[in-house]
Amino acid sequence: IGVPSPNASLAIHYLEAAYHLAQSIQSAHSLALMYEYPQHSNHLVPTEIYAAFEWFKAAAEGGHVPSMAELALCYELGCGVVQSDEASLDWYMKAAQACRWT
């Protein structure tokens, strides 16, 4: 009995299902990380900055603060989207406001 080898396609399938069926913004964030940073998938998922942007956007729009900051960075650098200082600042401000403790 061995440990099954990692299956990136299956992981992506379940994360997408969790997002679409349960509106899991954490799943959207995890997908974005897998597409943006190869180490988040044990280097099994090739970098796809456009997919990463779309998943960061989905999670950010759902209120996921780390995704808001990542989305702002995407806009700042033009990764997966046309570069926009205005959109970048807007998302950085949303992330900062969401983190304020009252």
Image (tube, rainbow, N blue to C red):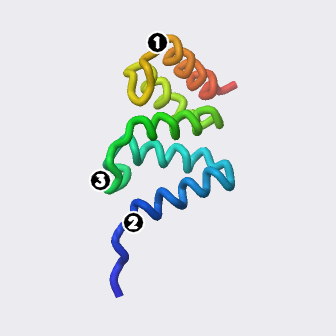
Residue 42, image x, y percentages: 32, 56
Residue highlighted by disc 2: 7
The quarter of the displayed image where residue 49 is located:
top left
Residue highlighted by disc 3: 43
Identified at 60% across, 22% down, the residue is 94
Label 2, label 3: how far apart the Cα atoms are: 11 Å
Identified at 56% across, 53% down, the residue is 16
Which is nearer the N-term, disc 2 or disc 1? 2
* In the image, farthest residue toward the left: 43
Identified at 52% across, 43% down, the residue is 29
Residue 95, image x, y percentages: 57, 25
Please tell me whether residue 55 is drawn above or below residue 70 in the rendered image.
below
Residue highlighted by disc 1: 85
Q: Amino acid at mark 2?
A: Asn
Which is nearer the N-term, disc 2 or disc 3? 2
Q: Quadrant of the N terminus?
A: bottom left
Which is nearer the N-term, disc 3 or disc 1? 3
Label 3, label 1: how far apart the Cα atoms are: 31 Å
Label 2, label 1: how far apart the Cα atoms are: 38 Å
Label 3 element class: loop
Label 1 element class: helix
